[in-house]
Amino acid sequence: MLAVDVSASVDRAEFELMLGGLALAWRDPRVQAAIAALPSGALAVSALFWSEAQEVAVPWRRVASPEEAEALAEALADAPRLPEARATALGEALAASLRLLAACPFPARRATVDVSGDGRSNRGRPPGPFRDLAAASGITVNALAVLDEEPDLLAYFAQEVIAGPRAFAMACDDYAAFPEAILRKLLREIPAAPAGLA
């Protein structure tokens, strides 16, 4: 479950860097090799855009081949932004992500919420209860903190957002560094990534 921050702190250029970076990551041969190495040989992927509101940007789809990874990349690159950028509601984003995971039509051995964002929660319910619910359900929540506006955001994500088995938080300095960072994050998240790739 890709949960992507599209709140008011993310301008149009930064939004395009995020979506372009996600598309490049799913096109990367190393990501595709990691998927092929999974016991099932496939992932189920969906994308949620979140701010104060949430919207499913890419519905659930199965990714088991380079062609399906390319189709996912195209869907991410073409996804329109929410009509109105709003506040940063991380708790609501986690709540929506957990609902979407529960509705996934594909059986899964492991569930992960991949959160990316550039700010603390400043609207809606706090993330802590939903982080705890994810952990109690065996769901991993990982986070990528973009530090251009809040240099100490990584510590906040580590304390308030991540949860579950092998959870981690990573940082990138700004949105220009997002494509490389999200690639490293995906390679780390895919459970059977071949040695030396992550």
Image (cartoon, rainbow, N blue to C red):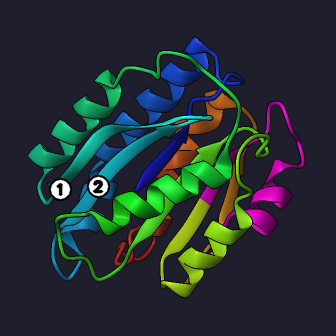
Location of residue 173 in the rendering, given as x and y in whole percent from the top left corner = 76, 38
Q: Amino acid at mark 2?
A: Val
Residue 154 drawn above or below residue 4: below
In the drawing, does residue 143 fall left or right of residue 108?
A: right
Location of residue 4 in the rendering, given as x and y in whole percent from the top left corner = 52, 41
Q: Residue at x 71, y 53 (%)?
A: 125
Q: Amino acid at mark 1?
A: Val
Any part of residue 72 in sight = yes
In the drawing, does residue 144 fall left or right of residue 29?
A: right
Image: magenta residue range:
143-162
Circles 1, 2 touching at the beta carbon (< 8 Å): yes
Q: Secondary structure at mark 1?
A: strand
**Sequence-first disc among 1 and 2:** 2
Closest to the observer, 122 or 35: 122
In the rendered image, which residue does mark 2 sit on?
45
What is the crowding at mark 2: few (fewer than 14 residues within 10 Å), some, or many (at least 20)?
Answer: some
Q: Residue at x 27, y 36 (%)?
A: 73
Residue occupying the far right of the picture: 152
In the rendered image, which residue does mark 1 sit on?
63
Location of residue 109 in the rendering, given as x and y in whole percent from the top left corner = 29, 83
Residue 80 drawn above or below residue 102: above
Image quadrant holding the N terminus, namely bottom left
